[in-house]
Amino acid sequence: MAKLPPPLYLDEDVSAVVGAILVARGYAAVTVRDTKQLGRSDSVQLAHAAGTLRVLVTHITHNRDDLERLHREWLEVGKSHAGIIISRRRSPGEIAARVGRLLSRLGGEELRNQLFYV
């Protein structure tokens, strides 16, 4: 039986075009704009993603260190999240393709409480 890909939550560093491509490819992806979370801190974004059981997708930017730190802190205190995917700056099509390849290999349970770079 095929793994059902987990739903995704794209933070404001990720182009809405990436979200549109992922949705067109059948993924359940929403952006911070869709959920009215624009401008919130990384901590709030991760909590929102975790609370809605969505994998957080972001770019390597100034917040990479913040998300790595938050990931470690959550694990240390026993908090759970659906996963974090960090992409280098690439074209929207390339980011969507890389996220899609990762999701085709790993299901939600394999992503849970993990941090991946694509």
Image: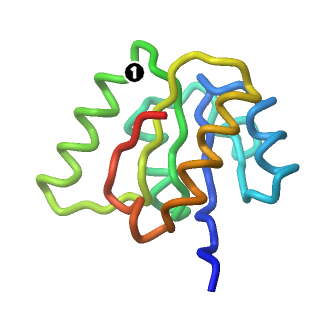
Q: Is residue 58 left or right of residue 2?
A: left
Specify the quadrant of the image occupied by residue 115: top left
Residue 43 at x, y = what percent? 37, 38
The front one of 103 and 47 is: 103
Indicate how the structure is coloured in the image: rainbow
Quarter the N terminus occupies: bottom right
The residue drawn where x is 53% and y is 50% is 102
User: Mark 1 = which residue?
Assistant: 63
Residue 52 at x, y = what percent? 55, 62
Residue 100 at x, y = what percent? 65, 48
Q: Is residue 47 left or right of residue 22?
A: left
Which residue reaches farthest bottom?
1
Residue 4 against residue 113 in the figure, above or below: below
Q: Amino acid at mark 1?
A: Asn
The residue drawn where x is 62% and y is 65% is 5
Which residue reaches farthest left?
76
The residue drawn where x is 70% and y is 46% is 35
Specify the quadrant of the image occupied by residue 18: top right
Residue 83 at x, y = what percent? 42, 53
Residue 31 against residue 27 in the figure, above or below: above
Q: Is residue 70 left or right of residue 22?
A: left
